[in-house]
Amino acid sequence: MTRISSLLAATAVGIVLSSGFAVADTKDKRIALSNNYAGNSWRQAMLKSWDKVTGQAVSDGAVAAADAFTTAENQATEQAAQIQNLILQGYDAIVVNAASPTALNGAVKEACDAGIIVVSFDGVVNEPCAWRIAVDFKQMGAVQLDYLAERLPDGGNLLEIRGLAGVFVDDEIHAGIEQGVAKHSKFKIVGSVHGDWTQEVAQKAVAGILPSLPEIAAVVTQGGDGYGAAEAFRAAGRPIPLIIMGNRQDELQWWKEQKDANGYETMSVSIAPGVSTLAFWVAQQILDGKDVPKDLVVPFLRIDQDTLEANLETTEKGGVANVEYTLEDAQKVIAGM
Amino acid sequence: MSPRTLRALLPALSLAALLIAIAIVQPRAMSYFGLNLMLNLALPIAFATMAQLCVITVNDLDLSIGSFVSFCACVGATWLAESPAFGVLVLLGCILVYAAVGALIHLRNLPSIVVTLGMSFVWLGCSVLLLPTPGGTAPDWLVSIVKLKTPVVPFAILASAVLALAVHGALMGSAYGAVLRGSGGNPQAIARAGWSQLTAKVALYALAGLFGVLAGLTLVGMTTSADANIALRYTLLSIAGVILGGGEFVGGRVSPIGAVLGALTLALAGSLLSFLRISPDWQIGAQGAILIVVLALRALVNRAEARAA
C-alpha cells in the first residue's frame, strides 16, 4: 500500500480498494485460529506472528477478523469442543494447529459440512476435507547429513539427540537422519539420547552418555538441544564437535560466540513459528475462491554461517528465529514453487 | 422450599443459568444444530461421570477412568472395526477387569486411589501398545449411531436423559439399589442385614466399567479415530461432574440425574467461556470459579439442611 493511498484511506472500503490485493471477496470473511498449546517459546512466537500479520491484514481490510483461540489444556477433546464452538460463532475459515492428527476428525468434518474452510498446519489433521500445510520433517533430518557430508568428507562418528519419545515429529526427523546416514555411509551413529527439545534435558542426557563414547565428529539434533549438547561437551573437557543447531536464540548466541572466538562453523535448521501466518494466507486464498491443493509443504528455515548475524539480531532473547509470511509467499507455496 | 429439594434443584438451576447466558452471548447456539454441536462431546463425559458415580457410591475414587475411556476408544477404533467379535470380547474383558479391581480393593482392603492410579498407567500402556501413533477408524455403525439425527431434540440430549433416568431408576428406585448405596453409607448395617459387601462393590465397579466402555465408544464414534491420550482429562471432569451434580465423596450420597446435569454443565461452561472470548490463560481459572460458585451455593444449602434437621 502506498503512503498516499493510506492517507486517503480513511474508511475500510478505501483501504481495500487501494491495497492492491485481490481481496475484495474476503473483506467480510472471518478466520479463527484454533491452537492446542501455548506453553513454549515456539508456540508463543507462533501466536505473536499470527497477531502481527493478521492484525495488519484486518486493518488493511483483507479479512474482517482473525481471532486466535488456544485451549486451556493440551487435550484433543478440548480442542474438538473448541472447534465446535468456533463453528457456532460463524467463522468462515478455521486454521488449526491440532493436538492430534486423528482425534479432531469428527469436529473438522462437522466444520466442513457447515461450509467452513479448515486449514491445518504444523500439527495437521488427516480428515480429507481439510487442507494440510505439513512440514517435511524427514527432509529436516536428511539435510543435516547432506551438510555434514560436505563439511566432513572423511565421515566419522555421530551422536544423535532425539526429541520427545513417541511423538510423531521425533520419529520423522529420526527417520530422515537414518536415511541420510544410509546415503552417506562414512558416518556412523555411535550413540543416541533423548533431549526432549529442551537444552537442560539434552545437556544431562549427553553428559550421561559421553564417557562411553569414542571421539565424536558431529552431533545431529532436532532443535532446542544444540546448546545443551555443547555445554555437556565443554563440561566433560572434550573437544567440541560440529553441532547442528535448531534456530533457538541461545544456540545461535553460542554459535556466534564460538564463531568470533575460533571460527566455529555449523548450520542451523528448524521450522519458523511464522508458519501460522502462511496458514492464514492460504485460508484467505481459499476463501477468495482460489484453487488450492489439499496438501502443501512448508519450507523450513535454514541458517548458515553467513546469515547467522542477521538472524541472531532479529531473534528475541529466549525465542526462536522466525519469518513471517506474506500473501505473495503463500501464493508461491500454493503454486508449488 | 425445603433445603432438600433446593439441593436437588441446584444442578438443574446452574445448567439453566448457563444456557441462558449462552443464549444471550451467542443466540445462534440455541438451535437444534447449535445444541447438538455443543452437547455431543458432553455425552461421553456424561458416561464417564456415571462410571465415576458408581465408584464414588462405595466411597472410592477412580483415577483411572480417563485412561480407561481412552483405551476403550482405541479398541473401538481398531479391533472392534477389524474383527467385531474379538472387539466385543475385549470390551467385555475390560468390564471383568474393572469388577476384579473392585474385588481386589475390597478383599485386600486397599485404598482405591492407589489401585486405580496404578491401573491408569496399565490402561495407558495398553492404549499405547495398541495405537502407538494416533489413528484407527471407528466402525460405521458406531459413527451412525452417535451422529443420529433425532427429530426435534438432539440425540445427545435424548441419550443423556435416558442415561440419567435409567441409572436413577436402578440406583435410587430399586431395592438392591438402596443396598448398593447403603454399602457406601453404612457398610456395617448392610453387612449385618446379610448383604455381601463384596458383591455390592464388584457390581458397582462392573457398572463403572460398563459406563467407561460406553464413554469410549461414543467418544470414538464422534471423533471417528482414536489417540492413546484422547480422554485423559475425563478423570478430573468426571469427579467434578459427580460433585457438581450433588454427590458427596463419602456416605453413598449420589444423584445420577444431578451427575448428568453436572457433566453437561461442565461441557457447556467451556463453550460459554469461549463465546465470551476469555483468554485461555484465564479459562481454567474461570472454569474453576464456576465450580467454586456452585459448590459454595451447595455449602449454604447444606447448612440450611443441617439447621432444619
Image (spheres, coloured by chain):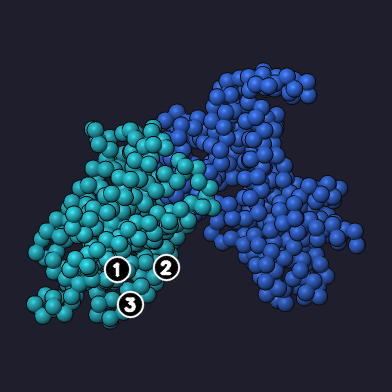
Say which chain is blue.
Answer: A
Residue nearer the viewer, B44 or B268: B268
Cα–Cα span, label 1 and label 3 = 14 Å
Is the same chain shared between marks 1 and 3?
yes
Q: Residue at x 47, y 55 (%)?
A: B284
The quadrant of the rendering that contains the N terminus of chain A is top right
Amino acid type of the residue that numbered disc 1 sits on in the rendered structure:
Phe
Mark 1, other Cα within 10 Å: few <14 / some 14–19 / many ≥20? some
**Which residue corresponds to mark 1?**
B249
Q: Which SS class for mark 3?
A: loop
Q: Earlier in the sequence, mark 1 or mark 3?
A: 3
Cα–Cα span, label 2 and label 3 = 17 Å
Left or right: residue A237 compared with residue A54: right
Residue nearer the viewer, B41 or A213: B41
Left or right: residue B17 compared with residue A199: left
Cα–Cα span, label 2 and label 1 = 23 Å
Residue nearer the viewer, B87 or B107: B107
Q: Image quadrant of residue A68? A: top right
Closest to the camera, between mark 2 and mark 3, is 3
Q: Which SS class for mark 1?
A: loop
Q: Residue at x 20, y 72 (%)?
A: B185
Q: Residue at x 72, y 42 (%)?
A: A323
Note whether residue B10 is visible.
yes
**Which residue corresponds to mark 2?**
B121
**Which residue corresponds to mark 3?**
B111
- Count of numbered circles in the view: 3
Amino acid type of the residue that numbered disc 3 sits on in the rendered structure:
Pro
Say which chain is cyan.
Answer: B
Label 1 resides on the chain identified as B
